[in-house]
């Protein structure tokens, strides 16, 4: 029996909420999905007025009703009247946004904890005994009776209820995409889309168009660094030693890239490179280049010529095409 009483009380609550949904939609043709949040806001307004008018429950209830009426008028003037006669989707988006706004405001002001307005109103809520051992609180019983009275009044006499739709601006207008985008709440969506596109263009503008020229200052700095290094080498006077070292490093680096045995010295590595080059159908003379360097170790002309030759052999061995790279 107690379960049946609890079901009746819960059904009365949902019946009142459904009644509000239907009345608003039948009168304005607007589907108000924020109806539950507005009812919740009215309850929290009662909690606020109960704290403000402690010990005067009638005054607190009257003030809560007045505030709820004021909120309803503001919602109608600022939102519902603008969506009257528009597409259903417009009202759905607008009222969903309103519901989210109300829930956030309630949590910020009153927190998410459960509240008890009856304690602040200092009114008792004694239980009422029912047959079968069931009990129902006085407020729950008043809720069930109120729901029954509301639905009895709505039933009325049999007949047809007619609304003059011309008084609510229910006029047929031809569809227009521009009008659709500039009307509330779709103008907010259109504004967000425009802002997103603008931000995307601003973020990607540097990725399109012709490539930018490299910074000349950086290139000049590299050239200055190379020039200073060459001047230091020239000032030291060890040109022959630098060229001999360069030839040896080119041979070792080429052998490393060509997977030569690591234990080979310069002469053995030069012979291995000539043999590998011949196996690929080309000709090189790394052994001869080393022999000419060993014969004239201080002759700068010979050393520079053989350094260029070793450099050319290295490029040809690694790239497979002779005289194409253009850097020798």
Image (spheres, helix red, strand yellow):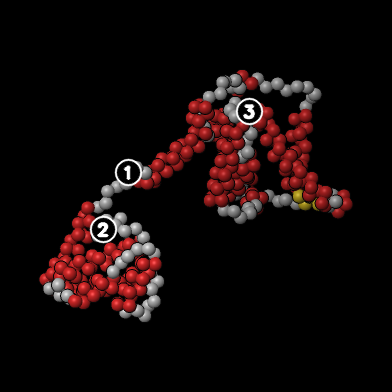
Visible in this render: residue 50?
A: no
Q: Nearer the viewer, mark 3 or mark 1?
A: 1
Is residue 26 shown above or below 259?
A: above
Residue picked out by circle 3: 28
Query: Relative to residue 176, is residue 140 drawn left or right?
Result: right
Q: Which residue is mark 2?
A: 327
Mark closest to the chain's N terminus, 3 or 1: 3
Q: Is residue 33 left or right of residue 298?
A: right
Q: Quadrant of the C terminus?
A: bottom left
Q: Which is more toward the observer, 100 or 124?
A: 100
Q: Position of residue 223 (x, y in %)?
A: 19, 59
Residue 299 at what x, y percent from top left?
Answer: 14, 72
The residue shown at (15%, 68%) is: 301
Residue that carries the numbered disc 1 in the rendered image: 210
Q: Nearer the viewer, residue 17 or 310?
A: 310
Q: CA distance from mark 3 to mark 1?
A: 58 Å
Mark 1 Cα shell of 10 Å, populated few (<14), some (14-19), many (≥20): few
Q: Residue at x 38, y 73 (%)?
A: 260
Q: Is residue 16 above or below residue 4?
A: above
Indicate the secondary structure of the residue bearing disc 3: helix
Find residue 23 and report its horizontal and vertical position in percent: 68, 31
């Amino acid at each position: 029996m107690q379960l049946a009483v609890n079901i009746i009380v819960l059904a009365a609550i949902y019946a009142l909420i459904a009644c509000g949904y239907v009345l608003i939609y039948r009168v304005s043709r607007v589907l108000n999905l924020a109806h539950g949040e507005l009812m919740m806001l009215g309850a929290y307004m009662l909690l606020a007025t109960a704290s403000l008018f402690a010990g005067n429950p009638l005054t607190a209830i009257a003030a809560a009703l007045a505030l709820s009426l004021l909120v309803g008028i503001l919602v109608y003037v600022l939102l519902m009247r603008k969506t009257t006669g528009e597409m259903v989707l417009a009202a759905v988006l607008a009222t969903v946004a309103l519901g989210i706004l109300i829930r956030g405001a309630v949590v910020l002001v009153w927190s998410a904890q459960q509240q008890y307005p009856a304690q602040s109103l200092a009114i008792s809520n004694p239980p009422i005994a029912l047959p079968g051992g069931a009990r129902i609180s006085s407020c729950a019983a008043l809720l069930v009776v109120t729901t029954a009275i509301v639905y009895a009044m709505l039933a009325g006499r049999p007949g047809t209820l007619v609304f003059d739709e011309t008084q609510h601006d229910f006029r047929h207008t031809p569809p227009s995409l521009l009008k659709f985008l500039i009307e509330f709440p779709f103008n907010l969506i259109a504004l967000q889309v425009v802002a997103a596109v603008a931000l995307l263009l601003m973020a990607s503008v540097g990725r399109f168009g012709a490539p930018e020229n490299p910074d000349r200052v950086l290139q000049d700095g590299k050239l200055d660094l190379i020039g200073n290094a060459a001047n230091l080498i020239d000032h030291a006077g060890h040109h022959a030693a630098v060229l001999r070292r360069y030839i040896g490093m080119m041979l070792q680096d080429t052998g490393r890239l060509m997977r030569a045995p690591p234990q080979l010295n310069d002469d053995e590595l030069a012979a291995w490179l000539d043999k590998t080059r011949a196996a690929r159908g080309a000709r090189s003379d790394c052994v001869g280049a080393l022999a000419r360097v060993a014969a004239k170790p201080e002759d700068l002309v010979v050393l520079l010529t053989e350094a260029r030759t070793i450099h050319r052999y290295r490029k040809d061995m690694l790239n497979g095409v002779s005289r194409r790279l253009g850097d020798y």
